[in-house]
Amino acid sequence: MFKSKYEWKVRKTDNAMPQELIDKYRLNNLEQRILENRGYVTDEDLVQLYDTETYDAHAVYQMDRAVKRIVDALSNDERILIYGDFDADGITSTAILYTALNKAGGHVDYLIPNRIDHGYGPNVELFEDQVVGQFNLVITVDNGVAAVEEIAFLRDRDIDVIIVDHHEFSETLPDAIIVHAAHEAGDYPFKYLAGVGITYKLICALGLEDDGMLGLVAIGTVADLVSIIDENKRLVIDGLKQINSNPSTGIQTLLSVSGHSGLVDEETIGFGIAPRLNSSGRIADASIAVELLLTTDRSEAFELASELEQLNSERKMLVQETFEDADMQYKESEDVIIVYSDEYHPGVIGIVASRLNETYGKPAVILTLDGDTYRGSARSIDGLDFLKIIKDNDTFVKKAGGHSQAFGVEIPKEHIADFCHSIEQYFKDQELSLKPVKYIDLMVEKDEYKIAEFERFENLKPFGQAFNRPIFMISQGRIKSLKQVGKDRNHIKITFENISIDTIGFNFGHLFHEVSPGDTISLVGTVNINEFNSKKSLQMIIQDAEISNVQILDMRSKVNQNFKMISVDDYFVIRNDAEKRGRNYYHYGEKLPFAIDTLVLRDLPESLALLGESLNNIHVSKIIMIFNNKEELYFTGAPGFDLIDGFYQMIRERDSGTINLIEDAVRWADHFNISMKSLKMITDILEELEKIEVKNGIIIKKDTDDEIVPGDIENSKVKSAIEQKIQSESKLKMSSNQELKNYIKRLIVDDGGNNES
């Protein structure tokens, strides 16, 4: 068996969509079934996807207060500081608000804290050094809602503060004008705007918006992984249109330098634009990205975009090095991943936490030392409010804030070991089921859906949080072909016998060693339309895999042998004359434990019956077939009666009644046109029948005149053992891969296969 990383849950619903809505939105069968399974069955539901709109910015709580204060600042030529954040959401928020206020003639500047020197959010030292005495109004974007003490520091020095944020509130609110779509005292229709989204609403309320900002709004919204439904969906749709029709100088140059050409969609943002903007704030200075978004000079844009490209490459290397180190430190027995180091780069620990979270399906916290404090980044799994758990167990926590699924945490150096122990113990005590859930929208059965239906479904783009790209499942598909692809053979392509959808799994190359053509496997993933040489086809991008039946891996050929898959702790079955190397070694014919994870059939059994006795009714997840053979008999065959009798008559005719095998064996073998192996079989049979005796390499005829009859040979135990060995070799070494797998499966549940030939 091969276990899935996720728990798979197929969406089902009893709620049917009314026919008038199907007609209104012109839904095909594929769209209808997916929407129904996701619970989108009313007009109110469907409007969030198909007929999205933006809402009145003035409906945001305290928006008018914020507008009045900014207008006063602009009128009085007050000095305004935009205090941003170093991720893509904060960078785009800073850029669009700076553009707006600068266009309005404001005396405006921006400041983004350095991730390494200052950490996330408002910082007293930074305020004291670069804000006090220099600015009259501070507007925080994409941060600030939890910074009670830091905001109080500014207010005590007569600096007004407007907080424009979307993060979770702390118990106490800062003394500031707070512009937040989800403010509990407000009733804004949509609560899930990103930092750049709520910043854009402020700009709209000021009457300073322009279409050129929409591209950056889309980038920040997608990058921050907020819900892509309702107003966010409209903002992203409009922003993508702007990027594709008339991109800003900075974005156009960044796309060019990164090698992207063609249409820009949400995936281009998520995997191309956002990581490059983020790289500046992760390992350098976020102002590099801000300046790129602000510039209209192509030469400057090229220099800045090239710098971001280089930073992104460095970031990738740091991520890989940190991931490998953290992966080695993580104890798989724990239900939560907590790794800390004095040397991790603070700019990549969030990405590493995400990768560990995705790899093992467990909540993860990665921390690095900063002075006398370990600063960390945490990622959770669906359905688990990890931030609440940390806050509820805050004895050793200095600070924690962000979202339930992704947040930052600070632990005093002297308490780091106690923190790790307390959180690990909490998870042990709770006995939580932590396997993350992957929701399946539809099962793929044969060729139920056509390319045209999938093309129509693309109308639901952009996909994202709250309405991700649909997940499909191939259940127990019988494999037609599979091959490893990619430079390092890390990826796999699989085709199926009765399903025309091809599949590709990036970083699923290991499956090549787990299954073979003819086996069944279940896969889940997204389905895209792949176009190659002007031909369109459906292709599943694998996200998870499961093999429900016993896995039987064929390593008979040296070409297919991958001994890295074998552990010293696995169970081994060996030939009866081989030495056992431990308690996990068994001879053929011995009863194996009832439940086994991995069983290695190392040697060829002396008979199929012995193999059946060992395998009958065991519960095993994986069987690895090697079937080493000390001596091959299949092509030699067992000697027949005429050959055995002819050899015996030659011995009888010798005057001495003896044969010196050391001197004459080769000559005798040539005489009968047999191999030395066959000659040995014949002498063993004759010795068993007490016709000869072999001493020190000399065959000596026994004192008997009895002839050999066919019945003697038929009753020979030696002859029978030879024939059983040949039968074993024929079945286990000469059968095709699929024939042998089917045979082994029958042995596990059958009568031991004693009647198999």
Image: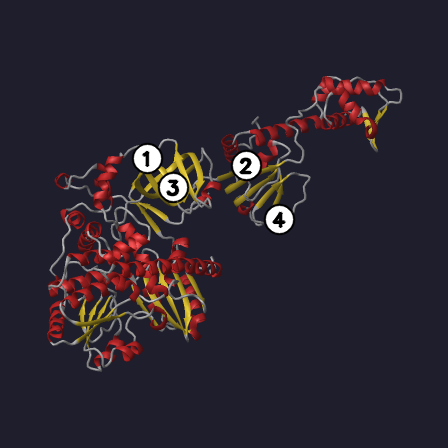
Q: Is residue 546 above or below residue 301?
A: above
**Residue 504: which disc?**
3
Q: Amino acid at mark 1?
A: Asn
**Residue 234 % position (x, y):** 17, 52
Whichever of labels 4 and 2 marks the residue nearer the N terminus, that label is 4
Relative vertical location of residue 36 with respect to residue 104 in this rendering, above or below: above
Residue hosting label 2 = 616
Q: Nearer the viewer, mark 2 or mark 1?
A: 1
Mark 4 in CB contact with mark 2 (< 8 angstroms): no
Q: Give the quadrant of the C terminus.
A: top right
Q: Is residue 555 left or right of residue 670?
A: left
Q: Residues within 10 Å of mark 4 (few under 14, many from 20)?
A: few
Tell me the residue that label 1 is attached to.
533
Q: Quadrant for residue 187, please give it.
A: bottom left
Between disc 1 and disc 4, the foreground one is 1
Residue 711 point in image, percent of width and height: 71, 19
The image position of residue 23, as x and y in percent, is 13, 38
CB under 8 Å between discs 4 and 3: no
Dot 2 amino acid type: Asn
* Residue appearing at x 59%, y 43% in the figure: 572
Sequence-first disc among 1 and 4: 1
How far across and down, in percent of the image, does residue 380 sit? 35, 59
Q: Amino acid at mark 4?
A: Arg
Distance from Cα at disc 2 to Cα at disc 1: 52 Å
Instruction: Answer left or right for 705 relative to 489.
Output: right
Binning the other alpha carbons within 10 Å of mark 1 as few (below 14), some (14 to 19) or many (20 upward) gives few
